[in-house]
Image (tube, grey):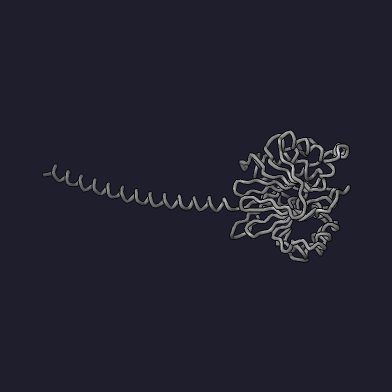
Amino acid sequence: MIKVGRQHEDKILKKKTLYCCRILLKIIGIFSVIFIMMNSIVIMYQKDTTRLFFLDVGQGDACVITHNEQTFLVDGGGNRYMDEENNMGMRVIYPFLLYKGIDNIDVAFISHMHYDHIKGVLELFDEIKIKKVAVSHVYKSIVEDEQQLQEHVLLNELIKKCKQTNTELIFVKEGDVFLGDGIKFVCHYPFSETEYEEDENKNSMVLELKTWQQQILFTGDIEADVEEAIEKKDVDIYGMDVLKVAHHGSATSSSQQFLERTHPTVGIISVGENRHGHPSQEVIARYNKLKIPVYLTMDYGMIEVSINRKHLKIKTHLRRNNDETVKRRYKK
């Protein structure tokens, strides 16, 4: 009798155990489905996000833009010296691209031929594939004149790099459009009639990025005379969401009329320690007067702007602490 009772209890225990296992498997299955669905939503959400990384390259400009497995670069920082400290292409941009798993650049836009905008791009050619390089059409006349090209050190080096790496070189002017997957770039300056100037700042490309109904304006190192020319021609640059402040916040740029016309939601100044007085306190005061918040890479390090169908967010990668910055969050 005792033996029979134990067998009965064992059967009941087995049934309970099987029942609990079935319930547990169902719960695991439900959570697995939820996890897969949530993960898919996150992946789709991230895929459709445009991200702009205004890198801290000291006194210079460099912005990496990613969207749907596409990568674009607007300027690359740098200067005339090639020591390790000043090699912005290899010290800052390339490690960042490696960190992000980026192995090619679809288009590199170079606003103009000053070291603090082009040198870092030139340094990248030997390390990463750059499919296309876009420069202002005013340089075409220099390229077509062998003597002038030889005298123009940076442009000459760019031509050589493009030939060596089979990179397409494109000359752009007002109205030219670059269409990507879900985003587009529109060139607003130089105008078709604009000619090459000895003052390189006057050759700067003005480029607008349009994504998710948001507008970001890159202004290179344009100064007040170019800002005035753009205003006179009634170029459609009203109500920008983000403005890359021209010429590192120089007093020769960001005129009151230009700021009132573009009236950005936020301004970003790419700047480092310098002897030029950038950014000008007069310029900062203009932004403050119009209640436009301004972020400086000198204070905040890399500035990340993420844009999707719902919002535009800004994330800084250094924090200010009594006017001193702390270590970077990304490393080589």
Q: Nearer the viewer, residue 112 or 5?
A: 112
**In the rendered image, is residue 11 in sight?**
yes
Is residue 30 positioned above or below 290 on the image? above
Percent across and percent down for residue 120 are 75, 41
Percent across and percent down for residue 205 are 78, 51
Q: Is residue 24 left or right of residue 131?
A: left
Name which quarter of the figure residue 1 lies in.
Answer: top left
Q: Nearer the viewer, residue 8 or 26?
A: 26
Q: Residue at x 76, y 56 (%)?
A: 188
Q: Is residue 222 left or right of residue 176?
A: right
Is residue 175 positioned above or below 69 on the image? below
Q: How many marks?
A: 0
Q: Nearer the viewer, residue 151 or 273?
A: 151
Q: Residue at x 32, y 51 (%)?
A: 23
Percent across and percent down for residue 177 are 70, 52
Q: Nearer the viewer, residue 299 or 104?
A: 104
Percent across and percent down for residue 203 are 83, 50
The C terminus - image quarter: top right
Q: Residue at x 76, y 44 (%)?
A: 77
